[in-house]
Amino acid sequence: MDSISSSSSAASSSDTSPISSLSPSRASSRTSLSSPTSLESSANLPSSSLSLSYASSILAREIGALQKLHNSLSDEESEQGKAFVDVVRRISSVGRGGMGAKVVCTGVGKSLIVARKAAGILCSFGVPSVTLHPTEAMHGDLGLLSSHDVLLLFSHSGTTRELLFFLPYIPPSIQKVLITSSPRSILAQNSDVVLTIPPEEADEEVPAPTASMLCMGALVDAIALTVLREREGADGAGRRKFGELHPGGRLGEVCRD
């Protein structure tokens, strides 16, 4: 009995001193959180108010860029408005008439990410679409292109080297649509239709593709959904089409209910 009592007492003592049960390495890791070095590092961090103020300014600039894009499409008689209608007309005709046409989306870097998004959402609406990297095109994938295709190019600057190198090898019968912030660029001069996005990014000092990528993606959404409306009508056929092309997953189930 004494031995049992002694063991119980030891266990109780251990329960009340959790740090003493840690291995030396774990104990030192726990206590280092309050070390002077750690406190000094914390002191160098920006205050939460400064961080939130900066983050808010980023979102404000991105919202402003989207508002400019919205305004550019509000007038049917504007150059941008006419270009948008033209792009929708061209893409709406893809895959119809038995010509085997498709939309080929291309770009480099972050613009290629938007190109993949464009191909993906257009496919989900019943428009045959693929993504083509311009460098891969120069190494055999030019065979992907056919005479009735629509080539959708994404380039913020309008001077992307890989696209410029690719340009002379595009069959002349292919329709070229460019989305860019530089409507007077070399790529723009060699495209059939040009849609422009605001040139500014979310941070004036850091030219990372932020607001421009957001606007490109939003413009893709507007094009794709308008194409779906043009092809399927406004009586719910677009929703049914989307559901038919999503036999798996919750989205398909919802559209087929």
Image (tube, helix red, strand yellow):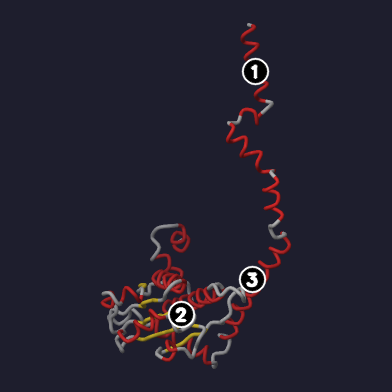
Give residue 78's position: percent from left, percent from top.
Answer: 55, 92
Decide: is 249 above or below 56. above
Q: Is residue 237 visible?
A: no
**What is the distance, in whole Å, between disc 2 and disc 1 at their CAs?**
71 Å
Residue on which disc 1 sits? 10
Query: Which mark sits nearer the N-terminus, 2 or 3?
Result: 3
Mark 2 or 1: the one toward you = 1
From mark 3 to mark 1, how far is it between C-alphas?
58 Å
Mark 3, residue position: 58
Compare residues 60 and 6 and report the one nearer the observer: 6
User: Where residue 133 appears, x then y in whole percent?
Assistant: 36, 73
Q: Position of residue 109 (x, y in %)?
A: 44, 72
Identify the amino acid type marked 1.
Ala
User: Is label 3 or label 1 in front?
Assistant: 1
Residue name at image x 28 percent, y 81 percent: 146
Mark 3 and mark 1 residues within 8 Å of each other at the beta carbon: no
